[in-house]
Amino acid sequence: MEYREFGKTGFKLPLFGMGTYYDPGWIAAAKLLKMKPRSELHLNAIITGLDQGVNFIDTAEIYGTETLVAKAISGRKRDEIFIATKVWRSNLDYDSVIKSCNGSLKNLQTSYIDLYQIHFPNKRIKISETMRAMEYLVKEGKIRYIGISNFSLRQMLDAEEALKTNDLASTQMPYSLVDGKIEKDILPHCRERKMAVLAYYPLGHGKLGSDNASLSAAVADISRNHGGKSLSQIALNWFYSKHENVFPIPRASNTVHVTENVGSVGWRLSMDEISRLESTISRAK
């Protein structure tokens, strides 16, 4: 596995992390019915990634997967695993942030969270109140770093300004070869501030999966140049080859996909290949 620095934190993380958002049906079943469909399949996927050096896991209180992550990391050295989770948008007042964090700590069966993120902004609650709670949690040792998710650039700037004693470590946004909206403003800002970017839906919500025959054929020459890499492996490697601060977090849904994702590291696309790949994807949109 390859590792690189995660923003300004000093941590070196694998080039990609494992996402644990499965689908709305999973969330509904977990929250309302106390059922977790295909939990063994997902658990084995996370364990497979951990066994292969992917020690970066992203979850959230609303996903219903924090307890699954706890099972996956059980028996492993906690300081060798980087856990990111999120507080939901309805829980952003001071007391609720702290309560949610304590709930996540209990679910994860850990004494601290590496990266605690605001899942979505909430215009009805002042960001200064939320960040005051976040900084309290850092001071108490319950979280190590503060992140945001689904914030516009303006909202990100407000969040940064609201912090008094800590820097914003990261933002999490949808980003892929087929969705480059953050390249206009958020990505340059994060690069300038040395903030990490967690890219969710890095395979374009399935559009860049290896079962996409037409796109696979279109990038066949790139695949051959690198020993027959799949479309999804090429799409993930695009992040590593083009960016220093972007960490894709593909979903760890089964062992086959996680193992395939591991094959996206250890090599690099050339600048010419990046250009051809982007041109091919652009025409296929």
Image: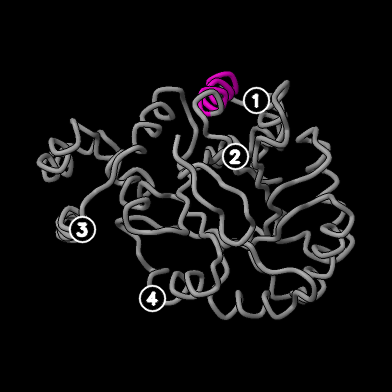
Magenta stretch? 39-49
Image height check: is 257 above or below 3? above
User: Which tag, 1 or 3, sits closer to the chain's start?
Assistant: 1
Q: CA distance from mark 4 to mark 1?
A: 37 Å
Q: CA distance from mark 2 to mark 4?
A: 27 Å
- Answer yes or no: do the residues labelled 4 and 3 have beta carbons within 8 Å? no
Q: Residues within 10 Å of mark 3 (few under 14, many from 20)?
A: few
User: Which tag, 3 or 2, sits closer to the chain's start?
Assistant: 2
Q: Which mark, by number, is residue 184?
A: 4
User: Which tag, 4 or 1, sits closer to the chain's start?
Assistant: 1
Residue 272 image position (x, y, % from top left) = 15, 57
Image height check: is 19 above or below 241? above
Q: Say if the magenta span includes residue 44.
A: yes
Residue that mark 3 sits on: 271
Of the pair 89 and 245, the residue shown nearer to us: 245
Q: CA distance from mark 1 to mark 3?
A: 38 Å
> Which picture quadrant has residue 139?
bottom right
Residue 167 image position (x, y, % from top left) = 69, 69
Question: In the image, what residue occupies the spot 50% across and 41% down?
Answer: 14
- Answer yes or no: do the residues labelled 4 and 1 have beta carbons within 8 Å? no
- Answer yes or no: do the residues labelled 3 and 2 have beta carbons within 8 Å? no
Q: Nearer the viewer, mark 1 or mark 3?
A: 3
Q: CA distance from mark 4 to mark 3?
A: 20 Å
Q: Residues within 10 Å of mark 2 (few under 14, many from 20)?
A: many
Q: Which mark, by number, is residue 72?
A: 1
Residue 224 image position (x, y, % from top left) = 13, 35
Look at label 2 and name its amino acid.
Answer: Ile
Check the picture and name the quadrant holding the C terminus: bottom left
> Which picture quadrant has residue 172?
bottom right
Residue that mark 2 sits on: 57
Q: Nearer the viewer, mark 3 or mark 2?
A: 3
